[in-house]
Amino acid sequence: MAVRDAASPLLLGLLCLLHTWGARAAVEVNMEDKVEVLLGDPAQITCMFKSDDFGGSGGMTIEWHYVKSSKDSQRIYSQDSLQSTVEKNTPYSDRITVNTTAGEVVLTIRDVQLKDDEVAFNCFVKIIGEGSGEGGTKLKVFKTPEDPTIQGVEQGISVSDEVTKIASCEVKNGHPKPKITWYRDKMPLHNIPDVVKLDHSVTTQSSGLYSVNSDLNMKVEKKDKDAVFYCEVTFLVPGAEKMLETKSINITVFYPPTTVNLWVESPKGKIKEGDTVEFLCASDGNSESQFFIIENNEGPSLKMENVTRENSGVFHCTVEDYENYVRLSTNTTVLVNYLDEVVIKPTGSVSVDWKKEFSATCNALSSLSTTTTWFKNGKEVEKGHHLNLKAVTYDTAGTYVCVVTVPEIQAMQANASLQLTVQGPPEMIEKQLNEKETNERELELTCHVRSYPTPNIIWGTTNGKIISSSNHMTGVGAKSVAKVQVNITSNTTVFCNASNEFGKDSVTYVIRFIKAETPKPQEKVQKGSYGVVIAVIIICILLLAILGSVLYFLYKKGKICNRSGKKDFTKEKSSKDKIVVEMKSDNTEEAILLGVNGEKQLPNDQ
């Protein structure tokens, strides 16, 4: 590109005159030694200059060159008073711009590349009448590398006197060349003859980027089994240095055993009969060639189920490492604790006389100390081996459970039971005198008795009448129940007598009979026949109405009264002392009069 300005002959002449008159002097040019930029970013290189007498741009020429070596320089830009030109067919033909101000020229390079742009750029300034000057700046291009990676060897490493590769670290695509440093437990590693050897290799990509690989080789020791390894990568960026770290890794180290241990893994604590016991055997070595034997069983563990006291004893474990010619043995002692069955004396079921004393003992053999407790109906009644009962009663009878416990082992206990029966005279549960009122003809009475053996029950009255007599009763243990149905007609007293070979007891029931009141006859009629009376009254009223209608009809027909006055009906009636009733036939109009005695009369006799 060229920019041309029209110049008058007068101006050209003036320039020539100044060039002739002016004394030649040097132009001072100042530039930075280097400019740093990240790959792909734009770079600005500034060229500053000063003149002694004249700073105008009319007689100034500016050129930019890039220099690969002292013998390889090429112009990429030129500018004079008439035009500015970007040179064609250079790596910068499409990527540079130049901005000129008073005393300063700035070269801008877009999309900086590594392969072409990491060179020196020179600025040449020439001013008519002032002379010329030049300066140069080295462009430095940086590229942040990818995150580094670390990889340990897959197989384990045996402890030996040889230096062995244990891990490698790699970082890719950085510029300038990154640096790798190895660390073990946060301490840097350096080359030590016959102990540590670090092998670094650098690969240069076609793009000019660097990839660095480093191998860590060491003489591995037993302590390295717990060591942590990682590598650190340092690299330069414009104006600074940065660092990246890899993840940490451990290595598998094989080493021969020096000691071996055997122990009971479960159960924890003391062992009792019936437990499942698991043994474990382990050494302080880590070798692929070592193996374990526990009581003639191969393997680092042994399980024994449902152990007994016969399994108590000494158990052995042996570890052998045939590659390292090592054989070690150890042992442990196991005690299986036991608790025998509980023995109660006297045994089984025991009968004790009422109000007498009773004692029993309970014990069980054990390998550990025990505690003994007596229970009845789930409640504690006594601690210790001995059970002592004074003046036993029917409340004392029942089942006694003796529980023997081993405090040192949870859930280790045994128990046995004793059935105690108290035999004695009957004892009534009800109070001695009971009063009852009833209006029922039958009454059921109940008698509760505590006695062993089962008593004979007699129900009777105070006048000597026996209602019931039986020794068949319902109940459990010493408690029995007797029932009777009593016919009640009046006040009476009933007693329940219970007796056995040890004595007797009784309870009395005083029964007051209440008669039900009988309702009066009037009340019965009023209550029971009130509806019937109303019905009879209604029927009588209806009959009177019908009779009235019949008499009125006969009167209208002249059958019962003499309207002509020829005969006296009253006199006729009194003379013959007869009452007649007229009856008509549907076929004839003949009227028949019947007397009271049933005699038939003709109509003319009326």
Image (cartoon, rainbow, N blue to C red):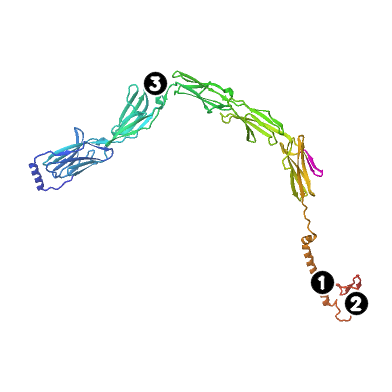
Most foreground residue, 73 or 256: 256
Left/right placement of residue 347 relative to residue 526 reads: left
Distance (Cα) linking label 2 and label 1: 24 Å
Q: Earlier in the sequence, mark 2 or mark 3?
A: 3
Residue 606 magenta-highlighted: no
| 606 up-or-down from 195: above or below | below
Q: Which residue does the numbered mark 2 point to in the structure image? A: 572
Q: Which residue does the numbered mark 3 point to in the structure image? A: 160
Which amino acid, mark 1?
A: Leu
From the image, give the main secondary structure of the stretch colored magenta: strand
Residue 288 lies in quadrant: top left
Q: Quadrant of the N terminus?
A: top left
The boundaries of the magenta stretch are 458-472
Q: Quadrant of the C terminus?
A: bottom right
Distance (Cα) linking label 2 and label 3: 175 Å
Q: Which secondary structure lies at badge 1?
A: helix
Which amino acid, mark 2?
A: Glu
Q: Which residue does the numbered mark 1 point to in the structure image? A: 547
Could you classify mark 2 by the number of other residues whose Cα lies within 10 Å: few (under 14), some (14-19), or many (20 or more)? few
| 122 up-or-down from 280: above or below | below
Q: Do residues under tags 3 and 1 come within 8 Å of each other at their CB atoms?
A: no
Q: Earlier in the sequence, mark 2 or mark 1?
A: 1
Residue 38 lies, in percent from the top left, at 28, 38
Which residue is at 79% across, 59% downward?
A: 520
Q: Which secondary structure lies at badge 3?
A: loop
Which mark lies nearer to you, 2 or 3?
2
